[in-house]
Image (spheres, rainbow, N blue to C red):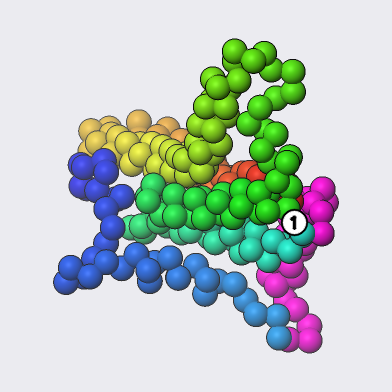
Amino acid sequence: MNQNLFASFNIPAILGIPLVILIIMLPATFITPTNNLINNRFSSLQQWLIQLMLKQMMITHSTKGRTWSLMLMALITFIALNNILGLTPYAFTPTTQLSMNLGMAIPLWAATVLMGLRFKTKLALAHFLPQGTPVPLIPMLIIIETISLFIQPVALAVRLTANITAGHLLMHLLGDTTLTLMSIYLSSSTITIIIIILLITLELGVALIQAYVFTLLVSLYLHDNS
């Protein structure tokens, strides 16, 4: 086994050509179309989950905010499928790349901020200066609020990257430990194998939760600006 912990996070390439675009597009093939008159169980479960998540995220939004429904559902599906893809053996996880997560977070965050400045200009600018602020603290608070605003997309991307990367590193370390124990004392490796199975189950939940958290935070930014 490759002892480099971060080797699995390298972008795969053939003849120097990165394959990341094909890998990102691969999970989309698991989404089944609904052209049939009678849906199968997988399609019914898929539609039920989408309706449940859509109801939870859109219930507090205004009419302008609800126009983002399709984009938010596509976002959570895209992130969840790519996270789950990384749990398969010898697979590359695109969401462990900070550059990709920033590429998703910054445009979505910027779109919500620009929407707020366009439709709720006074309210959007009022966030930079809370009511009743003493005059000497006004410049400092404006700077602090501006920095906190621009940190939002970075926090979105770093949260997703850190959680997915940490789980993969932990599974890699436990896998190396299991192989070492199997060569020394076979029965002692049983415990680590059980731990790995439990960890994979946990990582499956983390993959889905992180996709939901990322989309929910984008939805909250949209709610504040729509």
Give the x, y percent position of residue 172.
33, 41
Type of the residue with mark 1:
Gly
Among the 4 quarters of the image, the one containing residue 39: bottom right
Residue under the image location 50 percent in, 36 percent down = 151
Q: Give the residues drawn in magenta, as a range.
A: 36-63
Looking at the picture, does residue 190 appear above or below residue 109?
Answer: above
Residue 11 lies left or right of residue 206; in this view the side is left
Residue 166 lies left or right of residue 108; in this view the side is left
Residue 140 lies in the magenta-colored region: no
Residue 22 lies left or right of residue 78; in this view the side is left
Give the x, y percent position of residue 113.
61, 48
Give the x, y percent position of residue 176.
28, 39
Residue 120 lies left or right of residue 2; in this view the side is right
Residue under the image location 50 percent in, 31 percent down = 147
Mark yes or no: residue 45 visible. no
Residue 50 lies in the magenta-colored region: yes
Nearest the eye: 190 or 23: 23
Among the 4 quarters of the image, the one containing residue 136: top right
Nearest the eye: 53 or 193: 53
Prevailing secondary structure class for the magenta stretch in the rendered image:
helix
Looking at the picture, does residue 200 appear above or below residue 55?
Answer: above
**Mark 1 surroundings: few (<14), some (14-19) or many (≥20) residues within 10 A:** some
Give the x, y percent position of residue 156.
52, 42
Figure label count: 1
Nearest the eye: 31 or 197: 31
Residue under the image location 70 percent in, 25 percent down = 130
Residue under the image location 65 percent in, 59 percent down = 72
Q: Judging from the image, what secondary structure is the residue with disc 1 in?
A: helix
Mark yes or no: residue 217 visible. yes
Q: Which residue is mark 1?
A: 65
